[in-house]
Amino acid sequence: MCYRCKWVNQNNELYIKYHDTEWGVPVYDDTKLFEMITLEGAQAGLSWETVLNKRENYREAFYGYNLKKIISLDDKDIEYLMLNEGIVRNRLKIKSVIQNANVFVQIKKEYGSFSTFIWKYINNTPINGKYKTISLIPTKDELSDTISKDLKNKGMSFVGSTIMYAFMQAVGMINAHTIDCFRYKEIINSNIGRSG
């Protein structure tokens, strides 16, 4: 039998596929990193499953996360997005995507890539959580506090410490699969000898 992390809804094929193929796998692609910042921010106050179910709608609404196109969005575009039932229709969250895209571009200019910037916090080496149960997984820690503070200082929004801890788990900076999950060892083994 295949044991997964207990938080996965076993009745949602999309959720199962996300857990089994993406969650916790190190991400170095800037477009994917921006997507995950966007989706994790959208999740605030909601369930991850709700946002995951809207993922394709987000990709369409924000031009496949084309930063140049996102930055060019104006108030009229925001009003249009507020009518889009396929995404979370929260004005502050929609505005944050545009705001965060601008900051993301500046970080890319300064560091060469957002990936270089974000992975430096853990010296390009994923953290192995070694959690026995989901109840032992924290919702934030000192590292997520630091990253959150730094991103907020640069001008990003919806990047609180809890959001950033979830982001770090999603993009593989932390292997937060519980040790009884079949993906736990698979991810450890795939990370051996790999760096940013």
Image (cartoon, rainbow, N blue to C red):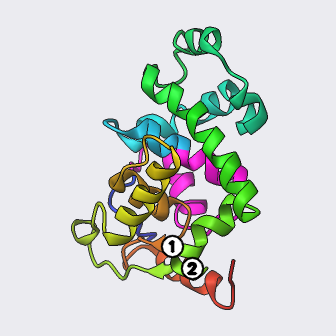
Q: CA distance from mark 2 to mark 1?
A: 5 Å
Dot label at residue 183: 1
* Up-down relation of residue 153 to residue 88 (above or below): below
Residue 187: image location, x then y, percent: 56, 77
What's the amino acid at mark 1? Arg
Quadrant where the N terminus sits is: bottom left
The segment highlighted magenta reads 9-37
- Observer-nearest of 138 and 105: 105
Q: Nearer the viewer, residue 26 or 122?
A: 122
Whether 95 is drawn above or below 190: the answer is: above
Q: Which residue is mark 2?
A: 186
- Furthest toward the bottom, the residue is 193
Residue 125 position in % (x across, y down)? 57, 83
- Residue 2 shown left or right of residue 36 in the figure: left
Q: Nearer the viewer, residue 43 or 17?
A: 43
**Mark 2 is on which residue type?**
Glu
Q: In the figure, is residue 186 to the left or right of 138?
A: right
> Which quadrant of the rendered structure holds the C terminus?
bottom right
Write the residue at 45% across / 36% down. 42
